[in-house]
Amino acid sequence: MKALVLERVGELSLRDIDLPQAMGPDDVRIRLHTVGVCGSDVHYYTHGHIGDFVVNEPMVLGHEAAGTVTEVGTNVRHLKAGDRVCMEPGIPDPLSRASRLGLYNVDPAVRFWATPPVHGVLCPETVHPAGFTYKLPDNVSFAEGAMVEPFAVGMQAATRARITPGDTAVVTGCGTIGIMVALAALAGGCSRVLISDLSETKLKLAETYDGITGINLRERNLAEAVDEATEGWGADIVFECSGAAAAVRDLFKVVRPGGTVVVVGLPPGPVPVDLAAACFRECRIETVFRYANVFDRALALIAAGKVDLKPLVSGTYVFDQSIAAFERAAEGRPEDVKLQIILDGEGN
Ligand code: ZN
């Protein structure tokens, strides 16, 4: 089957590759329609590794996917051929200790698409457990379906934050994930989100959503801006989405006493943290790794019109132009939130 293969760092090809296609009784076969280009895909392309995950042999990229069911296993009841679906890319071992604790996203045995050595789905067809495959409501497009995966990270962050209606949130980092977190925080009950970044272009894009106000760190310091917006009290919740050492260092200067800090961004290595500032405020610290049990809720919010991800699709490429899509993604244009690749011209 033809697929977008990362051969080694810096080298992509569109070529035939053998991929496992055996169906089990609990699986569905899916014809891929839309696959988003994720920062992690791009990082494997440009760096060849993320932390301990190293690309040692050719790997198919892509894990933000939507498509159409073409065949269902004998045990599958909730899906049928023709259903439009999106897929959760991480398959845990359901009997693992982590899964039994309800923490399947941190199951060390999880097999996650396009994370070495597991192939992704930038290919025409895949087989996936039906339990991790979600039917798209009729008013949710394939493009939106393929955005559920990155939005799920925002959903996980909002869930971890335990938002109280009316909370003020700060999001540090206005990249794709920062925007996803901001939208999930608003949908989850925050009255407003202040989002910080060094890029005016990114902030302007985020500010097209009601409830989001940008803080340009080239013009003003985060602590001052938050102080001013909250009359010196601080934010109820601070979501760190930049992974930048400077943002991590200042996190506890902007959270209110008794507030919550949610760490979403992954710094590339150890970074200093002002623990004393955290203690003085007795704040709660939460961390986020991917997501668990949020895909159906994400789809419900999108279908209800409470979250609109459509404006975040910055560019669409056909499958044959996948390499061009990755080259553009690797440029990191500030106006690009999400690039997507269409594998199947039918429907939307
Ligand atoms: Zn992703």
Image: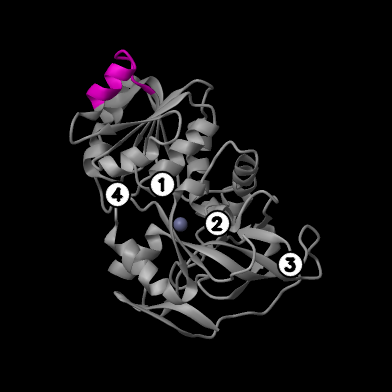
User: 222 and 236: which one is in front?
Assistant: 222
Q: Which residue is mark 2?
A: 143
> Which image quadrant for residue 56?
bottom left
Q: Quadrant of residue 65?
A: bottom right
Residue at the spot of label 4: 267
Question: SS at mark 4?
Answer: loop
First in residue order: circle 1 vs circle 2 = 2
Upstream in sequence: badge 1 or badge 4: 1
Instruction: Tell me the quadrant of the picture where the C terminus can be found.
Output: bottom right
Label disc, if present, on residue 263 of the rendered structure: none
Q: Check disc 3 and report the residue beneath it.
A: 26
247 vs 305, nearest the viewer: 305
Instruction: Give how far apart the Cα atoms at labels 4 and 3 are.
Output: 38 Å
Mark closer to the chain start, 3 or 2: 3
Q: Does the beta carbon of the residue at mark 4 sit less than 8 Å from ligand 1? A: no
Tell me the residue at 50%/59% (across/down).
108
Say which of marks 3 and 1 sits in front: 1
| SS class, disc 1 | helix
Under tag 3, what secondary structure?
Answer: loop
Amino acid tagged 1 = Ile
Q: How dense is the environment of label 4, judged by Cα within 10 Å: few (below 14), some, or many (20 and up)?
A: some
Is residue 54 visible in the rendered image? The answer is no
Q: Would you say the beta carbon of the disc 3 residue lies within 8 angstroms of ligand 1?
A: no
Range of magenta residues:
223-235
